[in-house]
Amino acid sequence: DQQVKQNSPSLSVQEGRISILNCDYTNSMFDYFLWYKKYPAEGPTFLISISSIKDKNEDGRFTVFLNKSAKHLSLHIVPSQPGDSAVYFCAARQEDTGGFKTIFGAGTRLFVKA
Amino acid sequence: ETGVTQSPTHLIKTRGQQVTLRCSSQSGHNTVSWYQQALGQGPQFIFQYYREEENGRGNFPPRFSGLQFPNYSSELNVNALELDDSALYLCASTTGAGNTIYFGEGSWLTVV
């Protein structure tokens, strides 16, 4: 039972254009959503997050949009740069017995072509 | 640089053996969680420790166990290793009320 889904395993974008990475979730109890970036041979690095009470959060070139009614979030990168080439993971947090746990999608590999 | 350190970075074990992986959390973080990331998949939640007590567990068998110490560092132990246990094991830390978890570089385990 995959609660966080990233249906596109890969995405290729030209440098300078917009990259849009999508994520769908099934659990309406998720209260916080995050995006992580992962380069080979490194651990995932936190990128940007959004609370379930908001619909948009922006940080420089990165913007995350949340559509709660559709249970969908997306990450926009504008303008895309070759250094953005990495695997991007969508994650969602839910309260669990005694604490919280963060659930991850399978990831989308982004290729930004120079 | 997240301040979360893991050891060892790489190791090879034989099927049936036991392994212990270690993690030092970021300063001030009292909550540690462990994830397994197999090739081509996202991190899968194993369990979480808060103030030395397990307070959340994913869908992993009991041969996956852990500890958290008073200084908030943590261990992941896996008994009776199987070939499918070959993966990247990630440790992440946060504060008890923290929204964001921060990962270490991971420990690559190969079971042969």
Image: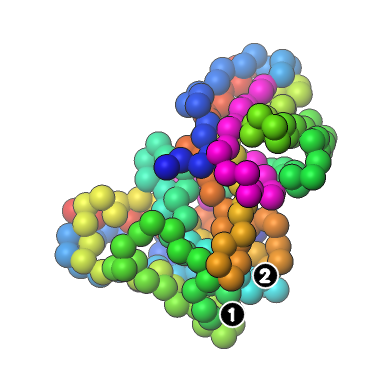
In the rendered image, residue A89, in percent from the top left (x then y), is placed at: 56, 39
Mark 2 sits on what residue? B96
Q: Position of residue A101 (x, y in %)?
A: 57, 58
- Spatial CA distance of label 1 from label 2 is 9 Å
Seen from the viewer's position, the closer of residues B1 and B18 is B18
Compared across the picture, whether A27 is left or right of B60 comes to right
Element at badge 1?
A: loop
Both marks 1 and 2 on one chain: yes
Residue positioned 76% across, 24% down in the render: A78
Q: Is residue A40 magenta?
A: yes
Query: Which of A33 and A110 lies nearest the eye of the viewer?
Result: A33
In the foreground, A85 or A71: A71
Instruction: State whether residue B40 is above or below residue B60.
Output: above
Callout 1: chain: B
Evaluate if marks 1 and 2 touch, with contact meaning CB atoms under 8 Å apart.
Answer: yes
Asked if one can make out residue B90 in the rendered structure from this viewpoint, the answer is yes
Instruction: Please name the residue that numbered disc 1 is placed on.
Output: B51
Q: Residue at x 71, y 66 (%)?
A: B97
Crowding around mark 1 (Cα neighbors within 10 Å: few <14, some 14 to 19, many 20+) is: some
Horizontally, is A65 left or right of B67 in the view?
right
Of the residues shown, which amino acid type is indicated by label 2?
Gly
Magenta part of the chain: A19-43
- Count of residue discs: 2
The residue drawn where x is 37% and y is 45% is: B38
**Residue at x 45% of width, y 64% of height:** B57
Q: Is residue A66 left or right of residue B37?
A: right
Asked where in the image residue A38 lies, by quadrant, the reply is top right
Callout 2: residue from which chain? B
